[in-house]
Image (cartoon, coloured by chain):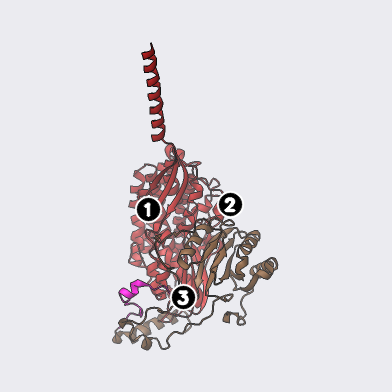
Amino acid sequence: MGDEQKPEEPSPSDEGREKLLNELSASLGETLIESHLRAHEDLWLRVRVENWSDAVRTARAAGFLYFGFLSAIDWDIAPEGRYEDTEFDEGLTEEDEQPVELDASSGYAGGDSRFQLLAQLYSLERQLGLLLKADVGDDMTVDTIRDIFPGADWHERETHEMFGITFQGHPTLHPLYLPTEFEGHPLRKDFPLLARHVKPWPGVVDIEEIPEHLEAQLEAEVMAAFEAEGGEV
Amino acid sequence: MTTTSDREQMAYVAAQAADARVNVELDTGDMTLNIGPQHPATHGTLRIACKLDGEQVVVAEPIMGYMHRGYEKLCEVRTYPQCTTLVNRIDWLGSFANEVPFILAAERLMEVEAPPRAQWIRTILFELSRIANLSLFLGDMGVQIGALTPVFFAFRDRERVLNQIEEVTGGRFHPNFDRIGGLKDDIPKGWVDETRSVMTKMRTFCDEMEDLLVGNEIFQARCRGVGVIPADVALGHGLSGANLRASGIDWDLRRDANPGLAWDQIDWRVWTHPDGDSFARYWVRLQETREATRIVDQLLDGIPTGPIMAKVPRIIKVPAGEAYVSTENPLGEMGYYIVSKGDLGPFRVKIRTPSFNNISVVPWVMKGVYVPDVITILGSLYFILGDIDR
């Protein structure tokens, strides 16, 4: 978890968000596990999953009245990768000097489990956004926040069918998009994307070939135009 | 005498039995009415299962997924430049506006900023797609209540705006014009003047709509006081765009959370209405369309010179991180939560679409309304199916 916790470069100070962070960490107390602050962006807070609804309630009490969205992230690395193993993708490693190595970290504010719940709230008065995260444990259950924000109803249904997270206390957790008899949770990383199995995707390397005799000329033109505008190389 | 009495008695029994039968057959219990999936008011395939008590709706439950295309999953197997093709098709009436927050989120992760000229042209195209999108709503709302003329006006005038978009981007509906670090191309010669004259025409169109609908007695009778959404309900459901502003909340991401586009450099205002009913939602959108033409006019005057593309590598790899950027799209707040792991494509994209939240208020607002009002309210909430189903 959290290679994001590396000492941040001297970022522009952001008093509003720092004040908010202090305020919320005081009222959340032990519920708060980690936080991540980047100037002029939403504030990330990771809370304990058993206190998920309390944390949302606390945020609402602190003035976050606007419900943005609720979803989840599956931090597992997809076993199929990005389906770059078809005949079309040969030569990818030449174009692209280093094959991509995905880090196994869990993003801002860290994470300990595979699935992470994510919700965005907004305070119109402060003009600040808040991203709440919680690690979902092996039992894959979490309390519903439908009673706090009625708009979360459909978002929880969607997250339930797409990731298989159960929201305790939600009365109508039947599928929103998928047919009733659908099996599996499509947005999990291990759910295969059948379209790619059926028909290989020709577009992984998406670079237009420039004819060789034009390349040098084009490059020079672009650079000249760029420098003429005072751009730094 | 006895026979008469017998006959009377028989008649009485028969009447009782007939009554009982009628009572059984004409059970006045709840009736289920399916609106859609194929219904002109649903702009696609949304089904609303209504349980009726007489003429009144007891429960209205939207059922969707007929058009779910799985964009969040597809984004995970594409590269960043390829994703704009997908997100174009979310709100297909204001396509360019869909690309912008996605590109801005990717740019934020890459710490790249598009040059000022690109930002201005982006803003212009953004507002043009707003006008194209909302003008169709302005006409379409008439159809929902039985007035057929406005929609023909709307299609006629929207075409002018689409032509302007096409002239720059090459695409009427799906421009796919925005790039990480700038734009694909510059605007063509003479385009600025043409657009200015189109904006004048669009203002005339707004006046026409005002005359045809806003001042119309029938329109007012059908829309005023219908489908009232109070401010706290709007906030709790995460309503956005004109639906939120029609409930009296002065909130516009263009002004309050500008992610770097040119809106803060010109003079414009946010329109709100205190009533929260169908009429307010129409009125706010009408004013917004008119305001958008003024925004475009001002932007056309001040397009800065300079390059339209920042220097970005040819193979775009976005550094690891997370970013959420949302903008005020024609339908409301549209945002992308991008999780990157340093790959060619995003690791996870959560698409927060305005219509999804806007329609989630339907079960609440439909309770107790009359059947004809269901259509008016749906029309005034204004959704695009692709925007709900993604």
Q: Tell me residue B389's x, y (percent).
A: 41, 60
Type of amino acid at the residue the image marks with label 2? Asp
- Circle 3 residues within 10 Å: few <14, some 14–19, many ≥20: many
Q: Secondary structure at mark 2?
A: helix
Identify which residue is drawn at 38% across, 21% down.
Answer: B10
Provide the residue span drawn in magenta. A190-210
Q: According to the colouring, which chain is red?
A: B
Label 3 element class:
loop
Which residue in the structure is indicated by mark 1?
B43
Precedes in sequence: disc 2 or disc 3: 2
Determine the chain carrying the residue at label 2: B
Q: Which chain is brown?
A: A
Quickly name the residue at label 2.
Answer: B232
Marks 3 and 1, Cα distance to the nearest angstrom?
32 Å
CB under 8 Å between discs 3 and 1: no
- Location of residue A79 in the rendering, given as x and y in whole percent from the top left corner: 42, 79
Please report whichever mark, 3 or 1, sits nearer to the chain's N-terminal start: 1
**Residue B304 visible to an observer of this rendering:** no
**Host chain of mark 1:** B
Pointers 1 and 2 in contact (C-beta within 8 Å): no
Residue for badge 3: B347
Chain letter for the residue marked with disc 3 in the picture: B
Q: Is residue B274 visible?
A: yes
